[in-house]
Image: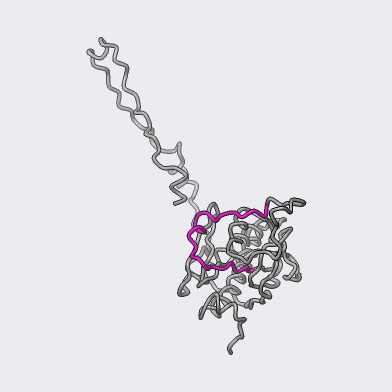
């Protein structure tokens, strides 16, 4: 059965639009299942484990579901631990907007971080931009922040596609996608009506994942592998030549360590 898609989705994703729509819904379902499993395994009285696994999964599961689509490209923002996916002309950014069912049209970006400011370079401009002489209530956060890292190499014409979803440790509630500008107080000004994403009931897994706890070492094995359980090393000592002693040549010690030739800049190429 064919599903009607709004025209903006085909403009952005081309013929991959239906696959992106299905893949995003599946990725969020997998994200929720992984996070709930992690929470169950920890048997914790708080939801910190769920929250951490959910945050990681909202990026990694999207990468997993979309990476094999024609034209799909991962891009890693500067200083961000995960990759975002570009398909066609769409740069996808999933984020949690609510822990309960809520009107997505009133959603806010959770935090106006440097990454968020860089991402919204690829979004429509807000309806009201501060004029040169509108000094009252000037908001420094509205300044344009140039993209860095992988975002600096994003092709011209790429559009930011937001994927807001609502969930909590008990259930995945809803998810949408659409284009929006970043307005005042982190509010989203939707350029397109946020469209609901299908959320399948089943979970898919890719590749091998830890299913059983590896065999643990026995107490006797640990004795052989502990740092103080092995044979003591032997040291070879040699006397200094009499010539060196007469010339007051200092004894030979360990060589000075070489300077590390790598730097943090190498990781940002």
- 206 vs 213, nearest the viewer: 206
Residue at the extreme bottom of the image, as rendered = 1
Residue at figure coordinates x 47%, y 67% from the top left: 73
Query: What percent of the width, then of the height, locates residue 260?
Result: 40, 38
Residue 142 on the magenta span: yes
Picture quadrant of residue 117: bottom right
- Which residue is situated farthest in the front direction here? 133
Note whether 262 is above or below 192 in the view shown: above
Colouring used for the render = one colour
Magenta span? 141-163
Q: Quadrant of the N terminus?
A: bottom right
Q: Is residue 264 left or right of residue 185?
A: left
Residue 266 x %, y %: 43, 47
User: Which residue is drawn at the image coordinates 51% and 81% (left, top)?
Assistant: 15
Tell me which corner region of the image, top left, top right, bottom left or bottom right, holds residue 70.
bottom left
Residue 232 lies left or right of residue 146; in this view the side is left
Front residue (pair 188, 59): 188
Decide whether residue 58 is among the magenta residues: no
Residue at image position (54%, 58%) is 82
216 vs 99: above or below: above
Residue 242 location (% of width, % of height): 23, 13
Q: Say which residue appears at 27% left-offset and 22% top-offset.
A: 238
Q: Quadrant of residue 29?
A: bottom right
Position in image of residue 64 (x %, y %):
51, 68
Q: Out of 48 and 106, give the one closest to the viewer.
A: 106
């Amino acid at each position: 059965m064919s599903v009607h898609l709004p025209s903006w989705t085909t403009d952005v994703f081309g013929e991959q639009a239906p696959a992106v729509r299905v893949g995003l819904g599946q990725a969020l379902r997998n994200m929720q299942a992984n996070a709930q499993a992690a929470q169950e395994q920890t048997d914790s009285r708080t939801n910190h484990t769920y929250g951490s696994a959910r945050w990681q999964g909202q990026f990694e599961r999207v990468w997993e579901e979309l990476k094999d689509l024609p034209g799909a490209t991962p891009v890693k923002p500067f200083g961000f631990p995960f990759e975002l996916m570009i398909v066609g002309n769409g740069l996808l950014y999933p984020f949690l907007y609510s822990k309960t069912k809520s009107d997505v049209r009133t959603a806010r970006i959770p935090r106006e971080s440097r990454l968020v400011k860089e991402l919204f370079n690829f979004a429509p401009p807000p309806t009201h931009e501060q004029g040169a002489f509108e000094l009252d209530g000037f908001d420094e956060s509205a300044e344009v922040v140039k993209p860095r890292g992988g975002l600096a190499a994003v092709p011209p014409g790429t559009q930011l596609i937001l994927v807001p979803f609502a969930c909590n440790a008990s259930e995945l509630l809803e998810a949408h996608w659409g284009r929006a500008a970043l307005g005042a107080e982190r509010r989203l000004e939707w350029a397109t009506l946020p469209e609901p994403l299908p959320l399948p009931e089943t979970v898919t897994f890719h590749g091998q994942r830890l299913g059983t706890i590896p065999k643990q070492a026995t107490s006797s094995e640990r004795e052989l592998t502990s740092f103080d359980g092995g044979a003591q090393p032997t040291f070879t000592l040699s006397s200094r030549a009499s010539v060196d002693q007469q010339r007051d040549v200092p004894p030979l010690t360990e060589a000075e360590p070489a300077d590390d030739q790598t730097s943090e800049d190498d990781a940002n190429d």
